[in-house]
């Protein structure tokens, strides 16, 4: 009975994976990059991307594409659209960004007639305002708006507020130093992107946006988490990387549902214990700061899956780190003061779910013989260190699929690697390897090997081609 149930489960999983793969192939086949190719089989076209084609107008024949859903016309010289686009019954997204000659009023009169349209990208770097006609887009759910740094945001947000169903606003890459309080009128927003501006602070009325679940503030000039965000109790994504934060204020506790937090590329000197109140946190990125210590109480984040500590000034890692059973991805590149040999000697047994580990650029000249006890590890990055060999026990890492040993000082092909029977990708770039052993033939699962900048004679490369004829060799 149990065998029958297991067979059924396996069969269902196989069918689902096959169906998904087939759908991905079909999606790819529905994507077109020219109108001519699309018109050759109009019934198949789902996505049409005509960006960067210097188009002055769109031919009326576009009306033949009755199944097109996404029409990308960005970075052209369009003035308006042909009336035929109104008759495209499935069109849901139109991108018209970076068409500086657009007649906005005419464009919105056409777009208003497309009843299925719910996603629009529009604007250009010198746009100062948008006409009131945009309120005719009653079904609009998402808009990306590009404009001048001195655009009239009072009016822009005022008219957008009349589109009651608007849930997603991308107001990024506009070099804005400040934006008007009228953004607080967009009370149905669940997604707000104000990234890549020059904001020193956010308007106070932003506090009215209680429904926001994703907030992108990266690449601005913020020195703290803005107080006007503290009403966003349902926030699950906060990206505030590449700003001027020097510490993590108590305001972080206002986001109890937060799942993804990016604080990278700031000026943080520590990981505040305030973070550990975020019990739902799954992804934490504090890379490229100046953090010197990581509290052991990080183990309180018992749902954490992805942790990036790279490019800091850490002198050690806390023992509590290995007790986070949910942890799948751990990036600790470029923290050369850490004694990784001691840490993994003492703490590697707890990494039960870890499948990705990056220890690149740490000046490592040796590894712990217990690395093999990280049993579920699939990807291991050890590039740009000072390794001349790896422990024999690493050959027991049966689940490892990808190993990067590039930029080290290997003079011989590392023998333990040939025992990694399921390894699919091996990187040995920038080493001093001149000989390939015959035992490489044991690596039956290997699909790709990169050997750039090694003093390998051509006959040694031919040896790989002979022993492993299906392997892709990168030189």
Image (spheres, rainbow, N blue to C red):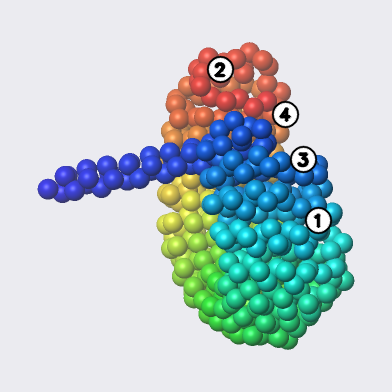
Q: What's the distance in space between the residues labelled 2 and 3, CA to CA?
A: 43 Å
Q: Which mark is residue 69?
A: none
For the point 66% across and 69% down, the residue is 136
Q: Earlier in the sequence, mark 2 or mark 1?
A: 1
Q: Which mark is in front, 2 or 1? A: 1
Whether label 2 touches label 1, CB < 8 Å: no
Residue 395 in the image: above or below residue 250? above
Dot 3 or dot 4: first in sequence order is 3
Q: Nearer the viewer, mark 3 or mark 4?
A: 3
Task: Kindly state the secondary structure of the residue where label 2 is placed.
Answer: helix
Q: CA distance from mark 1 to mark 4?
A: 51 Å
Tell me the CA gap for discs 3 and 4.
Answer: 39 Å
Q: Which residue is mark 3?
A: 53
Q: CA distance from mark 3 to mark 1?
A: 16 Å
Q: Residues within 10 Å of mark 4 (few under 14, many from 20)?
A: some
Give the residue pinned by disc 1: 102
Lower sequence index among marks 2 and 3:
3
Q: Are marks 3 and 4 in contact (CB under 8 Å)?
A: no
Query: Can residue 209 be spotted in the picture?
Result: yes
Q: Position of residue 233 (x, y in %)?
A: 55, 81
Where residue 192 appears, as percent x and y from the top left, is 65, 70
Q: Which disc number belongs to residue 465?
A: 2
């Amino acid at each position: 009975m149990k065998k029958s149930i297991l067979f059924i489960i396996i069969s269902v999983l196989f069918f689902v994976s096959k169906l998904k793969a087939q759908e991905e192939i079909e999606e790819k086949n529905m994507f077109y990059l020219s109108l001519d190719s699309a018109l050759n089989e109009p019934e198949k076209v789902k996505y049409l991307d005509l960006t960067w084609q210097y188009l002055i107008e769109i031919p009326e024949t576009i009306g033949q594409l009755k199944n097109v859903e996404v029409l990308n016309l960005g970075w052209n010289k369009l003035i308006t659209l042909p009336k035929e686009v109104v008759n495209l019954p499935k069109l849901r997204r139109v991108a018209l960004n970076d068409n500086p000659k657009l007649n906005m009023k005419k464009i919105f009169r056409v777009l208003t007639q497309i009843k299925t349209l719910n996603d629009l990208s529009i604007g250009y770097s010198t746009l100062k305002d948008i006409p009131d006609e945009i309120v005719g887009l009653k079904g609009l759910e998402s808009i990306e708006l590009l404009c001048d740094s001195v655009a009239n945001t009072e009016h822009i947000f005022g008219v957008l507020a009349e589109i009651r169903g608007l849930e997603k606003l991308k107001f990024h890459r506009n070099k804005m130093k400040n934006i008007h309080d009228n953004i607080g009128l967009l009370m149905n927003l669940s997604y707000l992107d104000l990234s890549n501006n020059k904001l020193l602070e956010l308007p106070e009325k932003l506090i009215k946006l209680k429904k926001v679940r994703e907030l992108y503030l990266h690449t601005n000039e913020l020195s703290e988490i803005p107080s006007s965000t503290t009403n966003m109790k349902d926030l699950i994504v906060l990206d505030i990387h590449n700003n001027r934060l020097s510490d993590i204020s108590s305001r972080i506790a206002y986001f109890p549902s937060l799942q993804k937090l990016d604080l990278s590329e700031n000026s943080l000197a520590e990981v505040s214990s305030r973070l550990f109140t975020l019990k739902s946190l799954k992804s934490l990125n504090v890379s490229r700061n100046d953090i010197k210590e990581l509290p052991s109480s990080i183990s309180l984040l018992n749902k954490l899956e992805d942790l990036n500590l790279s490019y800091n000034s850490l002198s050690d890692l806390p023992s509590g780190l290995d007790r986070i059973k949910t942890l799948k991805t751990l990036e600790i590149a470029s923290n050369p003061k850490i004694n990784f040999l001691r840490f993994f000697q003492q703490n590697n047994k707890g990494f039960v779910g870890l499948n990705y580990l990056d220890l690149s650029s740490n000046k490592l000249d040796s590894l712990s013989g217990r690395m093999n006890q990280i049993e579920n590890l699939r990807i291991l990055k050890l590039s740009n260190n000072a390794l001349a060999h790896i422990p024999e026990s690493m050959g027991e890492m049966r689940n490892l699929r990808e190993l990067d040993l590039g930029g080290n000082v290997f003079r011989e092909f590392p023998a333990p690697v040939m025992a990694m029977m399921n390894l699919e990708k091996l990187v040995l770039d920038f080493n001093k390897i001149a000989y390939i052993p015959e035992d490489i033939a044991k690596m039956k699962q290997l699909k790709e090997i990169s050997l750039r900048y090694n003093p390998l004679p051509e006959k040694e490369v031919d040896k790989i081609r002979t022993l492993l004829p299906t392997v892709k060799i990168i030189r």
